[in-house]
Amino acid sequence: MSPFPFSRRRSAHGPGVAAVTALGLVTLVACGAGDGADSSARKGPVSITFWGWTKGTQEVVDAFNASQNDVRVKFQEIPAGNAGGYAKISNAVKAGNAPDVFNVEYPQLPDFVSRGAVQDISEQVPGDLKSRYLPQAIRMTTLGGATWALPLDIAPQTFYYRTDIFEKAKITSPPKTWDEFRADAQKIKEADPQARIATFFPDDASAFEAMAWQAGGQWFKPEKDAWKVDFLDEGTKKAAGYWQKMIDDDLVHVAPSFSQQWTASLQKGRTAGYLGASWGAGVMGSTLPDQSGKWAAAPMPTFDGSAASGMVGGSTFAVSKDSEKAEAAVRFAQWATTTEASIKARIKAGASSAYPAAPKLVPVAKSAFKSALFGDQDLYGLYSDAAKSIRPGWAWGPVMGATDGSLKDSFAKVQKGGDITTAVREAEKATTKELRKRGIKVTG
Amino acid sequence: MAGSVPQRATALIRPAPVPGRHRSGAPALLLLPFFVLFTAVTLAPIGYAIHLSLYSEKRSGLGFGGVQRVFTGLGNYTSALGDQAFLDGFGNLALYCLFYIPLMIGLSLLLALLLDSALARAKRFFQLALFLPHAVPGIIAALIWMYLYTPNVSPVVGAMESAGLEFSMLGNPVPAVVNIAVWEWTGYNMIIFFAALQAIPRELLEAAVVDGAAPLRVALSIKLPLIRPSLVMACLFTVIGSLQLFTEPMILHGAAPDVVTSWTPNMYAYTAAFERNDYGLAAAASVLLALAAAALSFLVTRLSGGRSGKAKGAEA
Amino acid sequence: MSTATPTRPRRRQAPSHRPPALDVRRPRHWSMSRATVNSVLLLATLYMLLPLLWLLTASAKNTGDLVSGRTLTPDRWHLGENLANLAAVGDGVYFRWYLNSLLYAGGGAALCALICVAAGYAFHVYGFSGKEKLFGLVLLGVLVPTTALALPMYLLASQVGIVNSFWAVFLPSLVNPFGVYLARVFCGGYIPGEVLEAARTDGAGELRTFWSIGLRMVMPGFVTIFLFQFTAIWNNFFLPLVMLSDTQLFPVSLGLYAWNAQTHAFPAYYPLVVTGSLLAVIPLIVAFVALQRFWKAGMTAGAVK
């Protein structure tokens, strides 16, 4: 903790409201109070470093720096988490030169917490700040009773599809159930033997995890002092069986997510759909500039036809363990996740379709987001419904690196005699082993 | 041998021991920069890796209550050796070497012999053209080939598809990586072999030709034995290089899920460190890899007669 | 003769000067194999050059054409546009990377070669106790896979506080045990003891002798080590990958890797990666073509990597 004393935090956190001292840690004091202004005049702004990769981040940082003079954020863009970004952060944490604040996705947060890479920010995050975010998002950033990060967006899974290819295959409405999805997959393949309805991503465990989540799976349950680990529950088995059959019957492509192969297939119209998340729309807009107006979004199909969704990714802002500027870092994170100006800056940049974790910002995001790809479809309305249908109860375990690594490695074999159920079983074994190795308690 | 032996080679046998008083200071000064740096970037990290490999980080309960570093002795080594993924990495590496080394060395030797034969035209052009891939950094080579392997993107895959050939390079990591490595290193080794072949005294070859030996026979029974030291050296360095395999599979990993995160021991160590944050395990894996490299290099020099290559250098 | 001997670079012996004796007695079937020999060589050359040719055409394609594999036609020529984008992204950070690479590789290789030659010279010229043991240690260093060292080196560097700095990449690239080995061999081949003795009787200091006589005589060795090390540093990817996080410090290889990772989210980076790769390769190719005489001599001399 910082050696500096700090006064009681007030409830108002808008940048215009609080004056800020800059003593290596920022203290929020009463409105217009002179003492704060004095010290900031003496010391100049607090400078913090921030690493992230989410779209529009540079614009958010610029807007934040322009909006006030107390905290200077130095932003450094790093590769996306699983594309090397997490490695870089872990690296820096280990080396003791981590940035003050960085982006982590929900699944990896417990891992970061468990190895002591991020700091407990419960003190800086009072209850009324928490109440500005969706409760699901707060649940996933609260671990062992403490708050570890501020949520930026939530990412309900969403089905994007090519309306023209669907029409050509004489499909009139997007599938509501997985049975319909399978039937549609067959129609699309019949209409064009090279085309498939969607892609199974062997490199992206989180896509399948979202599917297991949606089907009612619950891999990790934190109990009092131990984790209950059970990957092969009913929901997961259902999802695993379903997708294995889709792969065996050659009704979906199997290709890495966002690979050249996948992108090329989309460009050529050989992939008619994408089981993505809310942020996916923005990405696709820049991937497929030539397919304007040809895409639409629909809620995820489900097994029983009633709305349900899991999440793929979703980012948070966490403060690194050794940062001595936690308060300034939280102040920036708060600004970046709860202010209208921030979400406008992010979405205006063009490629982001993040669905804010702070419900108040949804209308702002909605009016700022433009996508030629989807015509005039109200994506944010769809995301809102999807967000409500995210199944409660799913928790991420503290060794997702090991879990996902094992899943990815066995998913690579799904076309060559491996199968998803076995992959999940292997992942459970690897996870339990890793948990035990780290001294974490496991039951079940 | 007169033609090829350097005129001053005699100096090799006779280092120039120096009389005089000041020599104790000078050698130290000349050796110092290297050994200081060598200690800092080679010896110290090895020591540190061994040290790290003896510890593990432990948590308790749900795992959110902080981390303790505990001495686990050889625990990390037994974990690594007991991990199928790590062993599979060595398996992949072995399979890779099994194809790569004979293929690459064989091809570069063949090309060198062809170039050395009197029949080849435009030798300078061929030498240069065949060598060019070596000027391409490994990461770029891997990127180029990744594109060339990708269906829908690659003209090669396109041509193969229209010819009715279905072979997914992205689905078959070993050939995919071997091909990249062969592309990168064949020209390089070919130049080395070619240089060695050119250094063979012409008189020897002329004599053989006058005796009526066929070119193939000349190549196999005269040229090959004479450039054996070059061959051994090339093999040794290829083995050491192969064990470090990282860049190419790492690039392919993004496009080919079959190239798993622990596809080579090096990737295993990288993943252990940066994805699983198990630095003890990563250090243990690094140490094991270094040991394997040392053992293999030793084996290569031994198998090749021991007196050539490295060992010779020590006596030089 | 072992490889350890620098076989004198046969610069003056161009292939055309090969003994004519081989051509004199040419059996009839050789005309057949002449075609075979040259077509095998041609085939190999195609295999080596076509990927580079692909790179050349690919760098003139825009994102859509690149990713869909459309054949390049003159009306879809976007090279200029790609180059402009390359220069524009991140305020021209690409050229910064370029400069960094030159600095890491150029400066690193020059210093490394000097350090190696100094050590090799000392090993060759002087006798001292424990000399061969020390040299054995150097040889062991050759056998340690450098990538296995990168990780502990990183952790050490972070304790010293030089991680994510120029030095974190520069310092490790100054060390090449194999360079010392080569240097010793070269000194053996190029520096006759008599010359040094003569210099000494002239009363020149030891270091002066090294600097003005030894180093000069072993210059071909210096150039060889320089070239090896230059290529090695230019190609090195693993070390910068673990050491650097500040994009301003990246060498080209790491920068292109980072861009390649970005293609996941921003397909507009595809042509940047390809065009950037081309630009990174061209000067190397030009250098290798222009400096042919030198590296061939070096490789011939070492007849080793």
Image (spheres, coloured by chain):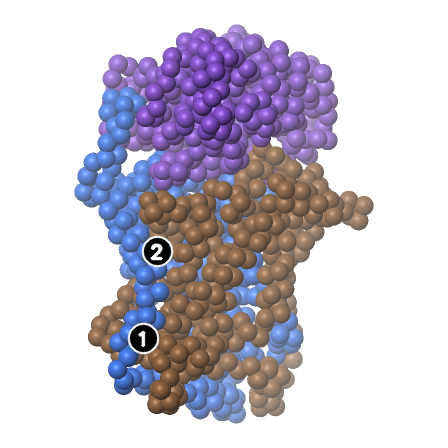
Chain colours: A purple, B blue, C brown
In the picture shown, does residue B2 fall above or below A123? below
Q: Nearer the viewer, residue C100 or A63?
A: A63
Q: Can marks 2 and 1 be said to lie on one chain? A: yes
Q: Residues within 10 Å of mark 2 (few under 14, many from 20)?
A: many
List x then y, in percent, for residue B206: 52, 90
Query: Disc 2 marks which residue?
Result: B41
Q: Locate the C terminus of chain A and report the quarter of the image it occupies.
A: top left
Left or right of B174, for residue A266: right
Residue ranking furthest to the right: C75
Query: Disc 1 marks which residue?
Result: B26
Q: Nearer the viewer, residue B64 or B202?
A: B64
Q: Element at badge 2?
A: helix
In the picture shown, does residue A425 fall above or below C150? above
Residue at the (52%, 47%) spot, across then down: C250
Host chain of mark 1: B
Would residue B205 be seen by someone viewing this image from the given angle? yes
Residue at the (52%, 51%) spot, across then down: C251
List x then y, in percent, for residue A190: 66, 26
Q: Locate the N terminus of chain A and report the quarter of the image it occupies.
A: top left
Q: Sequence order check: which comes first, mark 2 or mark 1?
A: 1
Residue type at numbered disc 2: Val
Residue at the (35%, 90%) spot, across then down: C201
Q: Element at badge 1?
A: helix
In the picture shown, does residue A215 fall above or below B298? above
Q: Nearer the viewer, residue C302 or B220?
A: C302
Q: Nearer the viewer, residue B129 or C291?
A: C291
Residue type at numbered disc 1: Ala
List x then y, in percent, for residue C145: 36, 56
Q: Which mark, residue C165?
A: none
